[in-house]
Amino acid sequence: MTDFWHTSGHHFLDRDDSGGYVVTDDFLKVYLARPELIPPPDACAAERALHAALTADPRRPIAASKIADIADADARVNWEVLIGFRDFLLQHKTLEAAYLDLMRRGVGRTPPLFINQLVHVILRNALEGVDDPVVLRAGELFFRPQRVTLHDGALIGADEETIGGIGTAPVSPLVSMLGLPPEAAIEMLNDDNAAGYWQRSDRFDMALDLSGGRAGLAGLAKAMERWVGHLLGVAVTIEGLTELRDTPLSWYVGLDAEATLMGNAMWRGEELDDNAKARVVGLFRLSFRDPHVMLEKVRGEPVYLVLAMTNEHLIRMKPQNLITGLPVKHLEAVT
């Protein structure tokens, strides 16, 4: 078996002619299975009726008055957010187009949880056909925070939720639907156990070596190439670097909030202090295979990517920065 990331919900989706994911009723019903939206035993009749109506027809138009009739204030907010998000998805041809629009216009009230779920399933589409478990494991950084530890001279990343023991409150209701274990033991991904990634990909219980020059960051580079190509329709090559020394930053992209601050400092010609240098996890050079897609002022110049961790040793990657931050003449290919 070489399928992976069932919890993304990809098997509930269809594809259009361009390969983008098309929303289906079954995919929308997954949101209705979230604990926040299943009416509790003491829910009012209006809330129970709304949930039942959408379970039967998840595309059913919902008037604001139907939500206003719900007695519980928190439940009203949850339903307002869900219906707004559902309607936003249905306005677009594909999930990819919806995500691009969301990143361009601003996320507004969209919960980070929903955005991460979009990234999860879109990246699943982008990585279709990849047979290297290291690339797939590295791709988990796109939508799941990682805790970084230095062990025997290696920089090890492990899933923050998994090591935190938050198995009782899974991010996706599909975790429960698929009968996955609520807690898992962390194991380092290596040549000996890589073949087992496919069966356990939804457990997020394999740690990854993120040391410079090793397979983990090379895998992340491949995942980023796929992500950019899938969403922007441009071919890029991304290679890992061990350092930036006397390198003019014609263009750079911070892959997280910390790295963006560091990149801004370097852009201003400031020297990073020892703390900042120690928190840099990955450096990459991105090249466009067709330089003509780039903005003229930096055409042919490499783009540098920086990934960093917080002072608390957490990586919170922002894959949208690869979409909105690159010097591409046309910011999206998906419509």
Image (tube, rainbow, N blue to C red):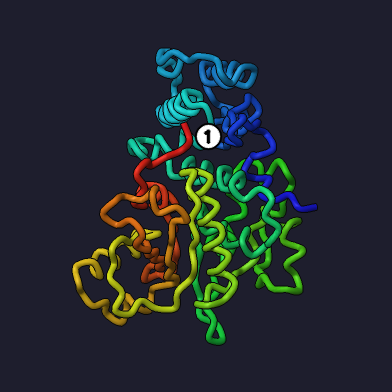
Identity of the residue drawn at 50% across and 77% down: 212
SS for callout 1: helix
Callout 1 crowding tier (Cα within 10 Å): few <14, some 14–19, many ≥20: many
Relative vertical location of residue 251 with respect to residue 85 in this rendering, above or below: below
Q: Against 67, is 213 above or below? A: below
Question: Residue at label 1?
Answer: 95
- Tell me which residue sits at (39%, 48%) in the image: 293
The residue type indicated by label 1 comes to Leu
**What residue lies at 40% left-to-right and 59% top-to-bottom?**
255
Going by the image, does 331 lie left or right of 215? left
Seen as rendered, the residue at the extreme bottom is: 152
From this view, report whether residue 187 is shown above or below residue 88: below
Residue 125 shows in the view: yes
Q: Position of residue 198 (x, y in %)?
A: 74, 56
Residue 103 versus residue 210 in the image, above or below: above
Q: Nearer the viewer, residue 31 or 152?
A: 152
